[in-house]
Image (tube, rainbow, N blue to C red):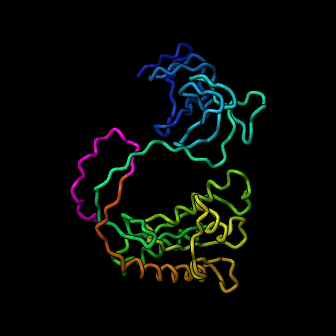
Amino acid sequence: MSSENPNSAIKPLYIKVHESDNVAIIVNSNGLPADSVFPDGLVLKEHVPQGHKVALVDLAQEAPIVRYGEIIGYAVKPIVKGAWIEGIPGSSAGRPGARYSVAGHQRYHPRFCRFDGYTFEGYRNADGSVGTKNLLAITTSVQCVAGVVDYVVKRIKAELLRKYPNVDGVIGLNHIYGCGVAINAPAAIVPIRTIHNLALNPNFGNEVMVVSLGCEKLTPERLLNEGGAHGIPIKVVSNDVICLQDEKFTGFMSMADAIMKQAEVRLVRLNQRRRELSQRPIWSSACSVAAATPSPALPPTRR
């Protein structure tokens, strides 16, 4: 595809992540100059640096800025299609040059349609959810423990999983949140909520297991009690949280062995689970898809 940019021989490129996004990211090195034309007809109104946002549509003042299918901010002044969307963290209203203010943790809600009558064989959980897999997940409260968890996950796969044929696997839910992050910052709820909700994934059978260091600001108690999208705490017992700074541990191997021991307790419970026929509504943003006739029951998922 040839470039239509009158000022350069380069091909203008941008990345749009979600179909509902009204902004995209310029990926060309050194950005693109004004009047660059994209294959879809979008024309830049001004120079846009690499990695910065460009408006894909005209945006009125206070219109939501949508990226990743989420509201990331609001226009503080009208923005024309093809303009550089320059934002400043925090409330940018009144700041020279600022064109949008950063949203807190509000969600964008596209239109979804409900399709009924579809079935599958899955793992039913106590909270009413149904998983498509049967996995053991080990959540981390801080990235400092990721190396220990990765080591234990390898050991579980090599030493324990073969004893529990009904368990599909084990994963470590690692992340890059460090000990000294600004945990009370307005947008900190986003990664906290993400880690919290990942621990509740239906594929994990409501088995919660957390490995912490002991000195992090994002304590397991805060992660489990405050991280939910609706403030719903995750109920745990004492053995669900393993703190690596506990005085009972005498070294790396004692930490790893303790995690292995608690993992096997959960593997025993997970191994008792069996697939059940489940009829669940399907929610899709593809509302134009004709779904008046339900599909027949799907065969069991094979491993």
Q: Position of residue 241 (x, y in %)?
A: 60, 77
Q: Where is residue 239 in the image (x, y as percent from the top left)?
A: 58, 82
Q: Where is residue 117 in the image (x, y as percent from the top left)?
A: 28, 56
Q: Main secondary structure of the magenta part?
A: loop
The answer to whether residue 133 is magenta is no
The answer to whether residue 298 is magenta is yes
Q: Residue at x 24, y 52 (%)?
A: 294
Closer-to-camera residue (223/50): 223
Q: Quadrant of residue 184?
A: bottom right
Q: From which residue to which does the magenta span run?
A: 283-303
Q: Where is residue 14 in the image (x, y as percent from the top left)?
A: 52, 31
Task: Name the residue at the top extreme.
Answer: 6
Closer-to-camera residue (110/219): 110
Task: Name the residue at the bottom extreme.
Answer: 248
Q: In this view, does 102 lie above or below 59?
A: below
Task: Name the residue at the left extreme.
Answer: 296
Q: Quadrant of the N terminus?
A: top left
Q: Is residue 241 above or below residue 297?
A: below
Q: In which quarter of the image is the C terminus?
A: bottom left
Q: Is residue 130 above or below residue 42?
A: below
Q: Residue at x 59, y 42 (%)?
A: 71
User: Left of 75 or right of it: where is 150?
Assistant: left
Q: Residue at x 28, y 60 (%)?
A: 119
Q: How many labels does the image show?
A: 0
